[in-house]
Image (cartoon, rainbow, N blue to C red):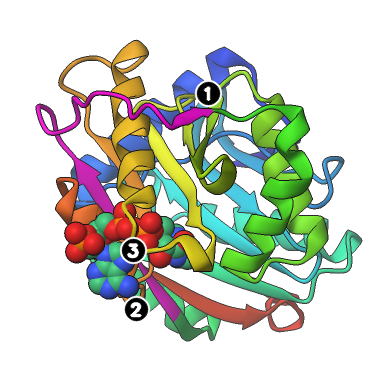
Amino acid sequence: MRVTSCTALDEHTQWDIRTLIAACNQSDGTYNELYLSNRFNAYPEMDAFFLLWDGNRLVGVLDLDADNTVCAEVSAYVLPEARGRGGFRTLIAAACRELERFRYSKLLFQTEQAFPDRMAIVAWLGATFEEAEELMLCHPPRRHRTPAPDVRPGTTEDFAALRALHIAAFGSTPDVAARYIGQSLRSTTTDLLVAELDGQIAGCGCIDHSGERPLIFGMCVTPSCRRQGVGRRLMQTLLAGTSRWAPPDMPTALYVSPQNEPARALYRSCGFETVSVYEYYAVPLARLRDV
Ligand SMILES: CC(C)(COP(=O)(O)OP(=O)(O)OC[C@H]1O[C@@H](n2cnc3c(N)ncnc32)[C@H](O)[C@@H]1OP(=O)(O)O)[C@@H](O)C(=O)NCCC(=O)NCCS
């Protein structure tokens, strides 16, 4: 088996990856969908996709999600029938070489609680639990909403206000906030919506439609404007927009920390339900040198 790597994927390869992940999800009882873009990565020139081939057949994939310069999140899939032949080891080794080239020091291995073999892999990596995250889905018909009148598409003129909002709400560094806002405003597959209160920007949220399920991310409201329905109006408008691209029976997804009770309460009240719990296990990159 051999590995190739790249910074961007053509449509044909994206399709092959989606088919591969669907087969893994079906076999493992998991839910993940990879978002196949490196646009939020700190280094656009760093390879983010590692493809495992058996002859001409794609049998595995590893994705690096690295929005900062220290720690990269890793998600990997190997087809059930290709497991037990060192494919994951080969993928991890290739990804670690690339991360070392960019001086990363830590890797966060992403897995789902439903994945039966996760603890064996975590033990083999020598990784330790760092945090959990819930995948929530909103199924139709609750997905179908009417847009709120005080929510509008963001524009480049909003950039400075949105970056400040992102920093205040998520504690992001200015660099990371600028990348999320700038890339989302520029993207043709993401809508960034802005909510106003008394004529001022009070919140924003994004929806990405490059994958199978629409994905909501970056929902935030200025601390002084919370508990006034801004988050709910943003969510209502984001959900209203999903019918433009997603098939009518497709759920809308988002990720949230189990500790983020305000956000979970908002999402539950808008019709989202938790369908899977993700776990992140940390390992210093140096420890993986000899895998
Ligand atoms: C999560 C967040 C966007 C909510 O925005 P908001 O404008 O305050 O939300 P709303 O006023 O529209 O609240 C709608 C419902 O959500 C729930 N809710 C919101 N904040 C809550 C809180 N602090 N405690 C409990 N429930 C809360 C309530 O059910 C509320 O309805 P109610 O006010 O009628 O009881 C905001 O708290 C925020 O920006 N947090 C920091 C960024 C963040 O964590 N984003 C989520 C990333 S996944």
Q: Residues within 10 Å of mark 1 (few under 14, many from 20)?
A: some
Q: Amino acid at mark 3?
A: Arg
User: Which residue appears at 43% of the width and 27% of the height?
Assistant: 211
Q: Answer with left or right where residue 46 lies relative to residue 25.
A: right
**Circle 2: element type:** loop
Find residue 27 and report its image quarter.
top left
Provide residue 115's location: percent of width, then percent of height: 27, 62
Q: CA distance from mark 2 to mark 3?
A: 18 Å
Residue 291 to residue 73: above or below:
below
Mark 2 or 1, nearer chain start? 1
Q: Which residue is mark 1?
A: 14
Provide residue 82's location: percent of width, then percent of height: 39, 44
Q: Which residue is mark 3?
A: 227
Q: Which residue is mark 2?
A: 259
Provide residue 184's location: percent of width, then percent of height: 64, 34
Label 1 beta carbon within 8 A of ligand 1: no
Ligand 1 occupies quarter: bottom left
